Amino acid sequence: MTKDLKFLFEPRGVIVTGVSSHPGKFGFVALHNILSCGYEGKVFAIGREESTVLEQKVTTSLDSIPENEADLMILCTPVEMNEELLRKASEKGVKAVFCAAGGYSETGEEGLKAEKRLVALAAELDLVLAGPNGQGVVSPPAGLCAQIVAPYAPKGRIAVVSQSGNFVSSFLNYANQTGIGISRSVSAGNAAATEIIDFLEWFSTDPATDVALCYLEGLEKGRDFFERIKTITKKLPIVLVKGGTTMGGQRAAASHTGSLASDSKIFEGMARQAGITRAPNIESAFEIAATFATQPLPSGPRVLVLTTAGGWGVVTADAISNSSELVLTPLPNDLKEEINKLLPPRWSKNNPIDLAGGETRDTIPELLSIASKHPEIDSIIQLGLGIQGNTANLVRTGKFYPNHGLERIVNFHERQERRYAEVSIKASLSSGKPILIASELATTQPNNPMVKTIRDSGQLCYASANRAVSALNHLVRYAIWRNQSN
Amino acid sequence: MTTASESESRQIVESAGISVSRWKTASDIDEALNAAREIGFPNALKLNGSSIAHKTEQGFVRLNLKTESEFLNAANELLENKIDDSDLLITEMLSGSREVIAGVVRDSQFGPCVMFGFGGVLAEAIADVEFRLAPITPYDARDLISSLKTTDLLKEFRGEEALDIDATIDLLIKLGDLAKDDKILSIDLNPLILVKGIPIAVDALVEIKEESL
């Protein structure tokens, strides 16, 4: 049964323990982050001494806290205090506890015993327990940044769970960089009572979440993980990075089959069976998850490439041909005839559609509108946008601006870029098909009006065509898997 | 854990519907010759017994015996060196230039897994094998086959038919079903020779839980 983690991510009020006036201590940082990132629920601070910290009253015991006003408690107190705090919190109506404090199983035998006691007590009190030894919980839809580190993240559709807290921060940093936001994030810490798979299960029931992003190192119950995750992936795409190649798997080795088996091979096979989207590294994992979060699922593998000039289209066609799932579909005849009406005869007459510089101000929007509606095209990769904005950038910063008619042309170029971006997004929405725009300007010139318009619309501009192809390939593979599994 | 003899192993996989090369056992030279005549020439001869795994390495295999006299020499030699309760196994000699490997293994993390990959003497060097957790679906089996790096080597080649994908899917599903039996610890079909594209096991090795024998 799915563990109900609602109170961890949507608490009505939050208690932080271990609050002191020292800005370097976990309790202080957690309180600071909760108070300064926009959480609107009630906040209660517990510390060693009665005081005021960050304009917040600090009391020495949970006794003074009213009943049923806080659902979540963030523990930043030493091991020996936490069991008593759990009992008291339960009396006050707390439903979920995130134990940021360390000193548990990660420290050895004694810590392990304390962790087992904490887990047993939480179960007895019917409390959700996350951690211990974790960074905390972030939940932008609730305005909640209950963690002992940075950063906070914009609100979006990606839910993050990680066995390493650092990678929670990495994913959230990418969310800030790209503007593709987060619905929930949690570092599982020692995952003593609530495991990675429990979080993933809850994410699949969470209306705020469209895709899960997961960093995993080790597993203790591999088969159980498989049986549960393959049910989750039927509803929710899961992008997973697996760290470490060994998991201590052991097999009978008298057979050839046994000697050829390795943990990484078996994990890879399991992941493919379970419909898990495996990413090779943290950076691409975020980009793939961001694609799931912002693009519709393609209904097939046929890709159309649309480019304003040659080279881009050629390398993108190569990348598509080398991908495992995507098909560079031949240009349908009826579409070819339509395009003939829009362009001078030197255009490519094939996929990629290379305009060869023959476009006028309305060509790209018209072409995109026709192409995206064509039933033999499942998705589009668009290249070569941003050039006019790049020109505008050079002219605007040059010594002749704004004279000689330059102001007018700069405005025209920038207006066109914004329009192209808007048209692409609109075409994707109205056709229900993915349209991915790739340009190095995404990173080299983030203020390019095309790049900026895409970002402001909550979409991702891919820094290279290869990256767009790779992300789209993962979407297609997942779509195929989901079709056959349902 | 005990290794079943090749004949026991063949029985186990055959009864699950997996294709193996034609075979017979014989306990003495007369029975062996009769079996050889029935199976035809050329054929292959092996020492067969539960303590004899990895027969090739131990010199207990004679391949491509073309005549009765070749066969008799080989049979006498093996019988002289026979160990424990072993007997002789006579099989047809399948020809085909390509081999694959398939099997079942139990992983302590993930339980029973089906394996398939590029086979033959180079199998362990190339190590192009893939695993799926048993039991497996037709989708899993097809995906497994197509995710091999050497999948191109299994396409049509010098007049030989390509790997029969449907037959292979069927084989892998049957292996996965065999793995439901807890007593079966592992299965090695190494190699299977492609005959008109269909993988046929020419050697089988099943490991069985000790107490169940």
Image (cartoon, coloured by chain):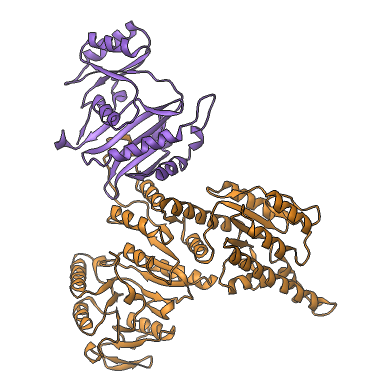
Chain colours: A orange, B purple
- Vertical placement of B14 versus A21: above or below? above
Q: Residue most toward the right? A: A404
Q: Quadrant of the N terminus of chain B?
A: top left
Spot occupied by residue A214 in the image (x, y as percentages of width and height): 40, 62
How many callouts does the rendering have?
A: 0
> Where residue A70 sits in the image (x, y, percent)?
30, 84
Q: Which of the 4 image quarters holds residue A40?
A: bottom left
The residue lying toward the viewer, choosing from A240 and A78, is: A240
Q: Residue furthest left?
A: B211
Q: Is residue B138 left or right of residue B135?
A: right
Residue B30 in view (yes/no):
yes
Picture layout, residue A42 above or below residue B187: below
| Position of A368 relative to A258 (above/below) | below
Q: Looking at the picture, how far across and down is residue A10, in whole percent?
A: 36, 78
- Quadrant occupied by the C terminus of chain B: top left
User: Measuring 30% from the left and 40% from the top, which residue is drawn there?
Assistant: B177
Left or right, A210 with reference to A302: left
- Quadrant location of residue A55? bottom left
The image shows residue A82 at horizontal and vertical percentages of: 22, 78
In the rendered image, is residue A190 in sight? no
Q: Nearer the viewer, residue A404 or B165?
A: B165
Residue at horizontal 32 percent and vertical 31 percent from the top: B17
Residue B52 is left or right of residue A327, and the answer is left
Q: Residue at x 53, y 72 (%)?
A: A179
